């Protein structure tokens, strides 16, 4: 038997069935238009932002990195809850342009920005987090050509990393950002060109579950920002401190102590150097804001035995939940939090493998899971599905198509 990951707080049962937003799983599938479906909870999204703001210093702004989940109704719901959005493509910029949202509250990071993306961002007033000297010069040339003042910041590749992070985005050779020893010279070029200088973006890693590691990384970010501001020769207008806050996916994972992180930041903010005393300070979070607010519901279409092993075959799978299948950067496959949604409060009765409908052995949603007995027509719930689910999975693989999505 393999343990399942911990089901996030905030989910209840109605007459034995998983409920989200006061509605049972079967009713939600019907409302969504069928199975499989991602269900996102407004209550849990709002609670996460409220709890985070209560823990963090008042001065700290919170941005949402929309790559975690760009579902349009979710973006519209998050818009008044957060202080800004972070994007990583022209396509994501187009999504935000459909909203009534101040695009000056948007920043654009990511290597390999095309000229058309840079032009669109400059015209929209978006802050561009520059990833290289070449990108900076292209942005300046484009701005001069169209007669606009670009809002430019520099993404820094720091010499340090975020310990224990799932993906390391800083330290050593990286495709992301400008190495810290070259930042000051580039910043001076941007200033002398007359651009609207917007400061620094220092992102060190993602999916960290150690508050000590995050506290250390944030302290290093503030120290480096002070050092670079001194080298540039003026205080920073803005510092994006990155994110990295993780959520528990697997057995043994524990949620972050965000109060400890907030307390440590408050202490640092009380003694900031002159270079940062008036700086706009923010963090950017994706999965931490939305990951636990989403559930993937998929119907069991077959129950079969093979060499004494029971398989529950669903109409969903890795084409919607690549990460839960273990194929999104995981070295050793472990079970996400999952349940039989139609018997959410029932006691486990058997060991089963939950697999998807694709003709590949990679399509697994749970291995050797101890769960209540389920039959054809019952629903499986995969939790922590609010981030890097629908748009981070190959939905068109084998012609399966996208899952439905519903915000309630």
Image: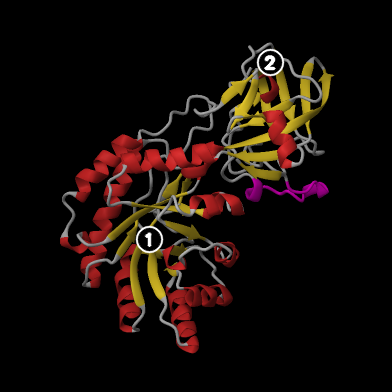
Q: Quadrant of residue 136?
A: bottom left
Q: Quadrant of residue 261?
A: top left
Q: Nearer the viewer, mark 2 or mark 1?
A: 2
Residue 306 location in percent, x, y? 83, 20
322 in magenta: no
Left or right: residue 89 versus residue 107 is: right
Identity of the residue drawn at 21% across and 72% down? 233
Give the residue pinned by disc 2. Answer: 372
Identity of the residue drawn at 58% across and 53% down? 70
Task: Judge the density around disc 1: few (<14), some (14-19), many (≥20) Cα neighbours within 10 Å.
Answer: many
Specify the label residue 102 is tagged with.
none
Left or right: residue 263 versus residue 38 is: left
393 in magenta: yes
Instruction: Point out the image quarter for the C terminus.
Output: top right
Instruction: Point out the image quarter for the N terminus.
Output: top right
Badge 2 or badge 1: first in the primary sequence: 1
| Res. 244 visible in picture | yes
Identity of the residue drawn at 77% across and 51% down? 396
Residue 133 location in percent, x, y? 42, 74
Q: Are marks 2 and 1 in contact (CB under 8 Å)?
A: no
Identity of the residue drawn at 68% across and 29% down? 25
Residue 142 location in percent, x, y? 49, 83
Camera-side residue of 314 and 114: 314
Calculate the distance from the C-alpha at mark 2 to the C-alpha at mark 1.
Answer: 47 Å
The residue segment tinted magenta is 390-402
* Residue 228 to residue 149: above or below: above
Q: Quadrant of residue 187?
A: bottom left
Give the residue pinned by disc 1. Answer: 201
| Res. 207 visible in picture | no
């Amino acid at each position: 038997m393999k343990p399942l990951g911990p089901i996030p707080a905030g989910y209840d049962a109605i007459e034995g069935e998983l409920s989200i937003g006061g509605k049972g799983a079967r009713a939600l599938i019907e409302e969504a238009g069928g199975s499989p479906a991602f269900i996102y909870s407004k209550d849990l999204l709002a609670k996460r932002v409220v709890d985070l703001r209560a823990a963090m210093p008042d001065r700290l702004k919170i941005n949402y990195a929309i790559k975690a989940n760009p579902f349009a109704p979710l973006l519209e719901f998050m818009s008044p809850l957060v202080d800004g959005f972070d994007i990583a493509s022209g396509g994501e910029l187009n999504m935000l342009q459909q909203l009534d949202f101040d695009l000056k509250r948007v920043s654009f990071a990511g290597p390999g920005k095309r000229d058309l993306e840079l032009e669109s961002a400059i015209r929209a007033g978006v802050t561009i987090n520059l990833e290289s000297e070449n990108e900076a010069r292209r942005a300046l040339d484009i701005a001069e050509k169209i007669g606009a003042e670009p809002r430019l910041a520099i993404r820094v590749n720091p010499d340090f990393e975020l310990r224990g992070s799932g993906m390391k985005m800083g330290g050593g050779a990286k495709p992301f950002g400008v190495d810290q020893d070259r930042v000051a010279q580039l910043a001076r070029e941007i200033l002398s060109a007359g651009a609207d200088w917007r400061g620094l973006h220092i992102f060190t890693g993602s999916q960290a579950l150690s508050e000590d590691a995050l506290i250390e990384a944030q302290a290093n970010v503030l120290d480096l920002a002070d050092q670079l501001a001194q080298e540039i020769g003026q205080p920073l207008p803005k510092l994006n401190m990155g994110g990295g806050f993780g959520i528990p996916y697997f057995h043994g994972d524990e949620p972050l102590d965000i109060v400890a992180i907030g307390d440590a930041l408050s202490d640092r903010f009380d003694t900031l150097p002159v270079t940062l005393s008036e700086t706009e300070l923010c963090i950017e979070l994706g999965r931490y804001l939305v990951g636990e607010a989403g559930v993937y519901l998929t119907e069991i279409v077959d129950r079969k035995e093979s060499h004494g092993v029971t398989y529950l075959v669903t109409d969903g799978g890795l084409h919607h939940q690549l990460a839960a299948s273990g194929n999104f950067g995981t070295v050793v496959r472990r079970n996400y939090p999952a349940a039989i949604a139609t018997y959410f409060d029932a006691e486990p009765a058997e060991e089963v493998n939950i697999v998807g409908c694709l003709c590949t052995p990679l399509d697994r949603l749970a291995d050797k899971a101890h769960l209540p007995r389920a039959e054809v027509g019952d629903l499986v719930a995969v939790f922590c599905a609010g981030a890097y689910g629908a748009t981070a999975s190959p939905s068109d693989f084998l012609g399966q198509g996208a899952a439905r999505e519903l915000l309630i």
